[in-house]
Amino acid sequence: METVSTNTAHGGVQGVYRHASAQTGTEMTFSVFVPPHADGAKLPVVWYLSGLTCTHANVTEKGEYRRLCAELGLIFVAPDTSPRGETVPDDAEGAYDFGLGAGFYVDATQEPYAKNYRMWSYVTEELPALVGAEFPADMARQSILGHSMGGHGALTIGLTFPDRYKAVSAFAPIVAPCQVPWGHKALPLYLGDDKTLWRKHDAVALIEDGARVKDLLVDQGEADNFLAEQLKPELLEQACADAGIALTLRRQPGYDHSYYFISSFMEDHLRWHAARLG
C-alpha cells in the first residue's frame, strides 16, 4: 500500500492510499479517515460507496463527514467506483453511465469487462482485508452507506451480508436497477442477459426474494432530476412494507442530487450508523 497523501483534520488523519488490486488487475485508490483515538484502540468502520462519474475524491472533499467521525470515533473509508487505467475498457461511446466511473459494484462476467470490473469482490473482500490489516479497524463492527449508484451498492451489499454490516443507509439510491434505464444499460453489459442474475444486484428484487435487514435509512431530494426516471424510491418503500423492514424514507424538499444534499444530511446518517455500531 502506497500513501498518496495525509492531512490532519479534527484531530484525526485523512489519508489517500493506492495499491495494486488482485481483483481488478489495476491500481486502485481509496481514502480513509481515522479519527483521534487511544493507542491500541480498534474503531468501527463506515464504508461509503460513491455514485456515477465519481472517485474516492468526491466525498473526501465535499462530504463533510470528518467532524462527526472524530466525535463518534468512526473510521470512514471511500473506495473508487471502478477500475481505471489505459487498458481498462470503457463505454464504447464514452458515456458517463457505464465503464470508467460506473462499475455498479458488480463482478462482471461479460467480455471485455470481466477481467477488470470486479467491484463487488473488491469492495466486499479485498479492500476490507487491506483496511483490517493496515488501520486500527474493528472489522466486527462495519456499516455501509452510499449515494446514487453507490446507494445501490450499499443497499445490495448490506442486504446480502446482513450479519456483517450493522447499519445500512443511502442518499438517493438506485433502488431497482432492473426497472430503470441506468440498470437496463449496465446490467446486461456486465452480467449478460439472464435477468435472474440481475436480481442479486437490485435492492427491491433482493427484498422480494427474501433478503432482510432490520432497518434502513434513505434520504431523497425532491428536486433531484433523476428521481422519477432512475431512482423510484417508492419501489423500495413498497418492498420494505411488504417485507416488514423498518424503512425510514425521508423526502427532502428543495434538495437535488448533489453533494450539497449529501453533506446536509451526512450527520444524520453517521449518527444512525454509530448508534447501531455500538
Image (tube, rainbow, N blue to C red):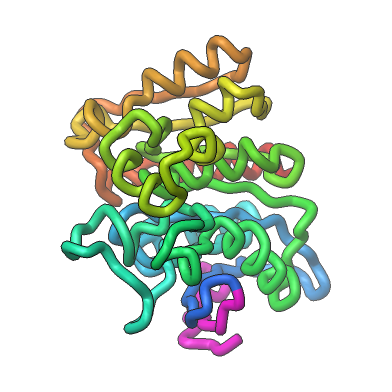
Provide the residue span drawn in magenta: 1-22
Can you give x and y, in whole percent of width and height, for residue 261 in the image? 30, 43
Can you give x and y, in whole percent of width and height, for residue 53 in the image? 28, 60
Can you give x and y, in whole percent of width and height, for residue 71 in the image? 59, 55
Q: Quadrant of the C terminus?
A: top right
Residue drawn at (69%, 51%), measured in percent from left and top? 142
Q: Work out whether residue 242 or residue 141 is closer to the camera in this orientation and state it.
A: 242
Provide the major secondary structure of the magenta segment: strand
Is 12 part of what is drawn in magenta? yes
Q: Quadrant of the N terminus?
A: bottom right
Q: Work out whether residue 255 or residue 113 is closer to the camera in this orientation and state it.
A: 113
Is 21 part of what is drawn in magenta? yes
Residue drawn at (55%, 68%), measured in percent from left and top? 33
The image shows residue 207, relative to residue 72, as above or below, that is above
The image shows residue 130, relative to residue 1, as above or below, that is above
Specify whether residue 8 is in view. Answer: no
Specify whether residue 102 is in view. Answer: yes
Residue drawn at (26%, 37%), measured in percent from left and top? 181
Q: Quadrant of residue 184?
A: top left
Residue that sits furthest to the right in the current view: 40
